[in-house]
Amino acid sequence: MAVIKTKLGKGGRVVIPAEYRKRLGIEPGDEIIVSFKDGEIKITTVREAVRRAQEIVRRFVPEGVSLVDELIQERRREAARESRE
């Protein structure tokens, strides 16, 4: 990937080069995530951040298991237990 030199504008604004915006699939007004680590600024799309989070969760949740379904079942068991008390 090419390295592009740019300047910092008023108010700390940085223009993301058109080629990079196209590759990220972002347009003016889209939300992005900006992080700072080890002296570098990283820009990530919300879509990519969600994909990565889902990938992390999948490491701990077996394929075919629905956390939503498990939570609903747990809440129903708690409600049933509370109604008996």
Image (cartoon, grey):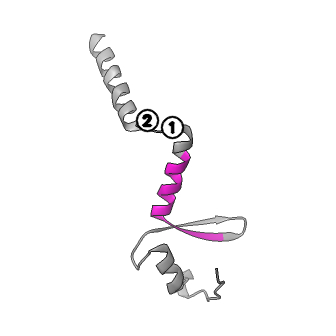
Q: Main secondary structure of the magenta part?
A: helix
Instruction: Name the residue rendered at 41%, 78% in the picture.
Output: 27
- Is residue 18 something one can see in this rendering? yes
7 in relation to 42, above or below = below
Question: Residue 64 in the image: x percent, y percent?
Answer: 43, 37
Q: Residue furthest right?
A: 38
Q: Magenta segment: does it hold 42?
A: yes
Return the residue at label 1: 61
How many marks are shown on the rendered structure?
Answer: 2
Determine if the magenta segment contains residue 20: no
Q: Is residue 16 visible?
A: no
Q: Which residue is mark 2?
A: 65
| Residue lying at the far front of the rendered structure | 63
Q: Which residues are magenta?
A: 41-56
Relative horizontal placement of residue 3, taking residue 74 as reference (left or right):
right
Q: Residue at x 35, y 21 (%)?
A: 78
Residue 83, label in figure:
none
Q: In the depicted view, which residue is nearer to us: 24 or 79?
A: 24
Q: Residue 2, image x and y in percent?
A: 65, 84
Nearer to me, 71 or 11 = 71
Label 1: which secondary element? loop
Secondary structure of the residue carrying numbered label 2: loop
Q: Position of residue 22 (x, y in %)?
A: 47, 80
Q: Amino acid at mark 1?
A: Val
User: Whole-Å distance between the Cαs marked 1 and 2?
Assistant: 7 Å
- Which quarter shows the N terminus? bottom right
Q: Residue at x 41, y 80 (%)?
A: 28
